[in-house]
Every structure is written in structure tokens, then in C-alpha cells.
Image (cartoon, coloured by chain):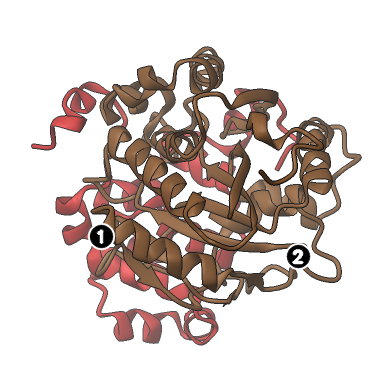
């Protein structure tokens, strides 16, 4: 246990990205990180299953990516900063991803913000 | 000898660079952000620093979790703009100051900070997002960067106290550089935000304002806090504020905060604070 983090477990709805999570989701995060390379983006756009094969993703990992199931991806151990790459490739904004984590629609989430137009 | 003119704390959320790239300066939803950076931009234009030492974090862009450095110092003469999924932003590549950076590597390692070094690796929005509001870049950036990456993504991340000490060691390393160089220290990240779980979208303006006060007046209080405190008060990504501590640690105790701005439009509290060292006053030429 990292003494710096003692008490974080009491915070509801918080997924800390630590070494155990990182190890569990390394393959998925590697695929997402790979979207920073244009050739991987092209393959993913044109032949998603071939891109999943190349990355060796499991059936569950493929489903979550295919359906952009942000909440499930987060629970599984995807790093937000790797998901951000998928968001950019699929044209999904960060507020929309955050809404997904919260189980809300984008419209519902924007109602909770100070300046909903600042996107 | 090199001198440190002051420091800047700034958020680095990608939408700052995005708003700039989409020319949102006069959009009422974005104008307060740009107004808040204007005095800092002016100050930099007046002081004309040669180098910005930039504490930032990579966002699993250039470095990946199969090999993720805790502290990494850029030592090359140039850094490409990173591709974060949409192709690189249309801004010039960032210039590095290899001479100062190599000297800092020597000095820091001999000061028992055994950090990773990197060359010609792309820099992502952790650097280039706030930079667009600080420095004009047409036709090219007016100065060079020495980037220092800090892991704030994959726990265990360095403690607040360690970041403060890194800042102090960076100060010693810069001030021992024999060439006449004007240096400004930049710490990026925060303020309150959380980008995961059902608690995503968490903000805490009261804490943010307290942080902005303490970072100037009593940074030791912030140094003594644990990551769990930062996460509880400012969200999981609010823990990025330890990079402001590195910046503050690199300034003298006499540095004064001369400007700050705070804007919380969406998910991330966007703040900028400017600190000036007393010796940076006009007409105080070399001793």
C-alpha cells in the first residue's frame, strides 16, 4: 500500500490508475496509445477487426472499444489519457466522455457546468 | 551567469490550445480565459527570457506505461509537436536549449536527482497547450524550452515533497550555468478536475483558491500534504498540482505573486499565476 494514497479508497466513483490497474489493462492501453500513430488510425478506421487482431484484444476489450462504452472501459482499467486518443479518433469530446463515466447524457452533464458552450 | 526572473503556474488542459487554434479569443465563452493570460504574455514579452524550464506531464503520448519515467529531462535542441490522435497541432516545433539542459543533467545527477534524459521526443499538450497563450509563435517561438516530465498518471507518482526538492535542485542547477541566460520556470497542470469514474467532473473552487493563495504565501503547507489530500480536495487529476510545487521550489522565498486568473467553464479549473523574483526589477543589471 502506498501511504500517499491512504484514504483514497473511501472516495466513491474514483478509479486510481496504479501499477495493478496498469498491468491488468496494459494490452488495451497499448492499443489506445497506438492511435497516436497515423498508420494505426487508418487501419482502425478502415478495418477495425484487423486493428484489434494486431493488438491481440480480447472479445470484451473489442466490444468496449467498438461500442465506445466509456464507463466500462474506465472500470476495466483504461487510462483516461489513452481513452482521450480514441475520443479524438472517433470525434468524441472530453465532456461527452466524462458524461459517459457519470452515466449521464452529454446534455445532462452540460447542465451541471458553468459555461456549457466552452467546448 | 544564468538568472531566474520568475515563475509561472498554469493549467495545461488541451482545450486551452484548442480554443487558441480555433481563434476563440473573442468568443464570450472563452474570452475570460484569454484575458487572464494577457498580463503573463505581456510580462514575458517585456522580460524576454531565453529559456522556459517547463515542468509538465506527458499524457501517455510520448511515453507509455511499459516504460514510464518518474522524472525525465529533455536535453535536445528541438522537440516535435506530438500527435495525440488528430495529427500534430499546426504550431512550429519547440526549440530546446541543449547547453543549459546538459549542464542541468550533470548538476542534477551530482545533486542526487538521477533522472531519465530524453532527446527529440515529441511534447504533447502538457507543454504546448498553455504555451500558445504565453508566447507568440509566428514565425517561430521566441525562445527555447527545457522540458522536465513528471509522472502524475501512474501511481506511485513522486511525492509533493520530492517535487518541491526537485524544484530546489533545478534552481541550483540553473543558477550554476556559466552563460548569461534569462530563465523563467513554468509549472503546469490542475487545478481541480477528475477525469475518471462517476466522480468525473468534480471541481472545488474553494480549494483551488486556497491553493493559489498557499502556493504564493505558504507553499510548505502544500508540500506537507499527501496525494490523498490533493485527490480528495481537487480530484484525481488535481494531483497534477505537484508540478506547481516543483516550479515554486525553484523560486526564491522572496518571489512575489504579481498576477493570477481563475476560470472554471467546463471540467477543468483553468488557472494561471505569475511570480516575479526581486532581482528581475528593471535596471538591476549584472553585478
Residue B234 picture quarter: top left
Viewer-side residue, B150 vs B52? B52
Q: Nearer the viewer, mark 1 or mark 2?
A: 1
- Determine whether, in the image, residue A83 is placed left or right of residue B188: left
The location of residue B195, given as percent across then percent down, is 44, 40
Q: Residue furthest left?
A: A1
| Residue neighbourhood size for the residue with mark 2, other residues' Cα within 10 Å, grouped as few (<14), some (14–19), many (≥20) | some
Front in this rendered view, residue B264 or B101: B101
- List the residue tagged with mark 1: B114
Given the image, what chain letter belongs to the residue carrying mark 2? Answer: B
Q: Quadrant of the C terminus of chain B?
A: top right
Q: Is residue A78 visible?
A: yes
The image quadrant that residue A83 belongs to is bottom left
In the image, taking residue A2 as reference, residue A45 lies left or right, namely right
Element carrying mark 2: loop
Instruction: Tell me which residue sits at (83%, 41%) in the image.
Output: B42
Amino acid at each position: 500500500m502506498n501511504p500517499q494514497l491512504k484514504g483514497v479508497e473511501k472516495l466513491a466513483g474514483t478509479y486510481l490508475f496504479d501499477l495493478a490497474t496498469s498491468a491488468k489493462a496494459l494490452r488495451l492501453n497499448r492499443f489506445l496509445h497506438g492511435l497516436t500513430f497515423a498508420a494505426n488510425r487508418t487501419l482502425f478506421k478502415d478495418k477495425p477487426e484487423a486493428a484489434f487482431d494486431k493488438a491481440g484484444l480480447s472479445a470484451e476489450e473489442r466490444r468496449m472499444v467498438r461500442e465506445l462504452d466509456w464507463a466500462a472501459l474506465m472500470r476495466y482499467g483504461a487510462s483516461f489519457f489513452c481513452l482521450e486518443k480514441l475520443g479524438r479518433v472517433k470525434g468524441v469530446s472530453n465532456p461527452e466522455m466524462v458524461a459517459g463515466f457519470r452515466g449521464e447524457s452529454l446534455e445532462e452533464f452540460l447542465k451541471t457546468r458553468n459555461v456549457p458552450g466552452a467546448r | 551567469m544564468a538568472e531566474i526572473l520568475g515563475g509561472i503556474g498554469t493549467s495545461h488542459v488541451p482545450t486551452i490550445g484548442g480554443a487558441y487554434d480555433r481563434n476563440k479569443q473573442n468568443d464570450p465563452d472563452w474570452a475570460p480565459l484569454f484575458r487572464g493570460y494577457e498580463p503573463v504574455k505581456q510580462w514575458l514579452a517585456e522580460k524576454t527570457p531565453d529559456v522556459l524550464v517547463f515542468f509538465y506531464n506527458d499524457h501517455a503520448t510520448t511515453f507509455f506505461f511499459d516504460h514510464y519515467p518518474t522524472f525525465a529531462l529533455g536535453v535536445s535542441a528541438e522537440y516535435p509537436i506530438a500527435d495525440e490522435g488528430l495529427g500534430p497541432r499546426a504550431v512550429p516545433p519547440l526549440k530546446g536549449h541543449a547547453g543549459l539542459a546538459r549542464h542541468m543533467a550533470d548538476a542534477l545527477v551530482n545533486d542526487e536527482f538521477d533522472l531519465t534524459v530524453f532527446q527529440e521526443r515529441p511534447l504533447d499538450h502538457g507543454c504546448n497547450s498553455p504555451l500558445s497563450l504565453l508566447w507568440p509563435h509566428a514565425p517561430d517561438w521566441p525562445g527555447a524550452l527545457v522540458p522536465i516530465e513528471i509522472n502524475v498518471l501512474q501511481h506511485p507518482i513522486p511525492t509533493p515533497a520530492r517535487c518541491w526538492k526537485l524544484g530546489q535542485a533545478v534552481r541550483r542547477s540553473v543558477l550554476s550555468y556559466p552563460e548569461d541566460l534569462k530563465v523563467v520556470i513554468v509549472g503546469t497542470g490542475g487545478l481541480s478536475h477528475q477525469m475518471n469514474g462517476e466522480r468525473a467532473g468534480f471541481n472545488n473552487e474553494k480549494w483551488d483558491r486556497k491553493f493559489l493563495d498557499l502556493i504564493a504565501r505558504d507553499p510548505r503547507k502544500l508540500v506537507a500534504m499527501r496525494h490523498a489530500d490533493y485527490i480528495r480536495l481537487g480530484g484525481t487529476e488535481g494531483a497534477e498540482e505537484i508540478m506547481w510545487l516543483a516550479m515554486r521550489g525553484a523560486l526564491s522565498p522572496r518571489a512575489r505573486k504579481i498576477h493570477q486568473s481563475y476560470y472554471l467553464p467546463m471540467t477543468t479549473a483553468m488557472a494561471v499565476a505569475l511570480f516575479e523574483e526581486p532581482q528581475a526589477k528593471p535596471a538591476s543589471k549584472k553585478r
